[in-house]
Image (spheres, coloured by chain):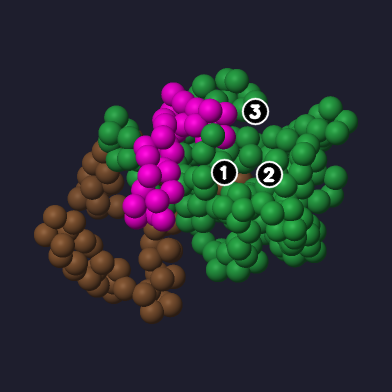
Amino acid sequence: MSASKKTMTLNLTDTEMSALEDLCSKKELSKTALLRQALRLYQLVEDRIEKGDKLFFEDKEKKEKAEVMML
Amino acid sequence: MSVSVSNVFLLNAAAGKAEPAELLHAITDKQLADWEAEWAPELLSSLQRLHRTGVARARWPQSRHWDWRRKATALQGMLAYPGFSVVCAGVTQGMMILDVATKRCRILSQGGKNLVYVWFVENAPWNRKELFDPPRYRGVGSILIRAAIELSKDLEFQGRIGLHSLPQANSFYANTCGMTDLGSDPDHQGLRYFEMTPEQAAAFIAKGGKT
């Protein structure tokens, strides 16, 4: 199933590495799997915003929506 | 870009024997051409047959309005939305588009973990039992669900998949696939939502995805 993959070195600060490891633990994913997932999401969000869409977080209980500003 | 291909088998219902087929990890121009030139005319003549014989519209294929070229074109190049297709005898027999980025598990025991969401999956008209008796090939749906499970494992989602089912497919997902039925989803046109846990995925694979 797997497509051929290329290897890269990633330089992270201690804080970034700590955040990555926390997320990996929470999601039960390896660092590679988590970063691949992040790339998929980032590409998707960028694509939608380039098309003029907006990204919101919604609090279902308070019925409040807050736009996420993408820089 | 090269397309990854796996060898699979479909059951030729008329001959009663397995026939070699290919699972493509993509939806290519060839699939879209097959959809336009082979699926669409066959679907139209099947709908005409149902209409002329007085079959209620509620029993017509519920995916009959799907435009695969529009879907595939809109999602082209998006890592979040991989496509798959099954080819046998030189013709596309089924297609599927997944969402691997935006959906989480709803089964409480899975704790909101990531899953592979089956966004669209469709058999060629001649493989659909509501249109052809017997259908030409059997096993397309199982192969595509198996592909979704394998991708889920490859992404470290442990085989978790989820989907909203068109009513005509509810039995397939509940009984053949062994997925958990989480009921009608008011946010999704009332379609039933089904989810597969890692344990259910392992059970589906163990039985060979047989229908």
Q: Residue furthest left?
A: A62
Q: Quadrant of residue A57?
A: bottom left
Q: Indicate the amino acid at tag 2.
A: Glu
Is residue A13 in the magenta section?
A: no
Q: Residue A23: percent from the left, percent from the top?
A: 27, 43
Which is more N-terminal, label 2 or label 3?
2
Magenta part of the chain = B172-201
Q: Residue beneath label 3, please?
A: B211
Residue B86 makes an appearance in the image: no
The secondary structure type at the circle numbered 2 is loop
Q: Quadrant of residue B198?
A: top left
- The reply to whether label 3 and label 2 mark residues of one chain is yes
The Cα atoms of the two marked residues, 2 and 1, are separated by 9 Å
Q: Position of residue A42 (x, y in %)?
A: 38, 62
Relative to B8, does residue A57 appear above or below in the rendering?
below
Residue B168's disc is 1
Task: Give the label on residue B130, or none.
Answer: 2
Task: Please report the residue visible at 81 percent of the width from the left and 29 percent of the height from the top.
Answer: B18
Q: Is residue B174 magenta?
A: yes
- Left or right relative to B60: residue B81: left
State the CA–CA distance, disc 1 to disc 3.
15 Å
